Amino acid sequence: MKIDLTKPEASDQLKAVQVLMLVMDPELGINIVDMGLIYDINLTDPSRIVVTMTLSSSYCPMGDSIVHGVEKTLQQQFPQRAIIIELVWDPIWTPDRISEEGKSLLERE
């Protein structure tokens, strides 16, 4: 996910990414940002945050837990905003979406 630092919501997007790094994929033990599961965080509407994300597969057994973690974590950081999760399957998640940091964490295990 890329953040345009010239946009007024960039600071809040960075905060959102930071707190989402606390949400872990329980199967791999890597945060969902480094897993590449977060496609977009839209904060242009001051009353809500829209997160476009995916899971490693549509059959992910921990999918509900991950989505709940995203909602809960963002709600704690941004209590004045509604949190909307858009779960998408296109583009499909593949391991090449894992960040370099995520790959190094996987290699340590």
Image (cartoon, grey):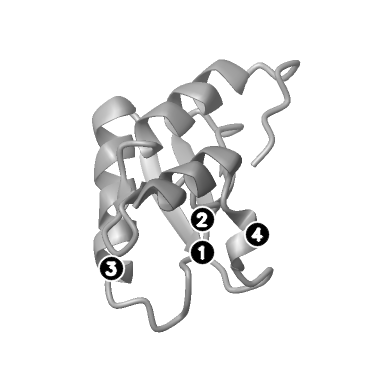
Callout 1 secondary element: loop
Which of the marked residues, 3 or 2, is nearer the chain's N terminus? 2
Q: Residue furthest bottom?
A: 59
Crowd rating for badge 3 (residues with CA inside 10 Å; few <14, some 14–19, many 20+): few
Looking at the image, is mark 3 or mark 4 earlier in the sequence?
A: 3
Which quarter of the picture shows residue 79?
top left
Closest to the observer: 44 or 101? Answer: 101
Q: Is residue 77 left or right of residue 46?
A: left
Does residue 31 sit above or below 8 in this rendering? below
Which residue is disc 4 drawn over? 96
Name the residue rendered at 73%, 25% in the picture.
4
Q: In this rendering, does residue 57 appear at all?
A: yes
Q: Earlier in the sequence, mark 1 or mark 2?
A: 2
* 3 or 4: mark nearer the eye: 4
Q: Secondary structure at mark 3?
A: helix
Q: Which mark is residue 64?
A: 3
Dot label at residue 37: 2
Q: Is residue 50 visible?
A: no
Sequence-first tag of 1 and 4: 1
Mark pair 3, 2: CA separation: 14 Å
Q: Circles 1 and 2: CB distance less than 8 Å?
A: yes
Q: Which residue is mark 1?
A: 54
Q: Are marks 3 and 2 in contact (CB under 8 Å)?
A: no
Q: Secondary structure at mark 4?
A: helix
Q: Nearer the viewer, mark 1 or mark 4?
A: 4
Residue closer to the observer: 33 or 5: 33
Q: Nearer the viewer, mark 2 or mark 4?
A: 4
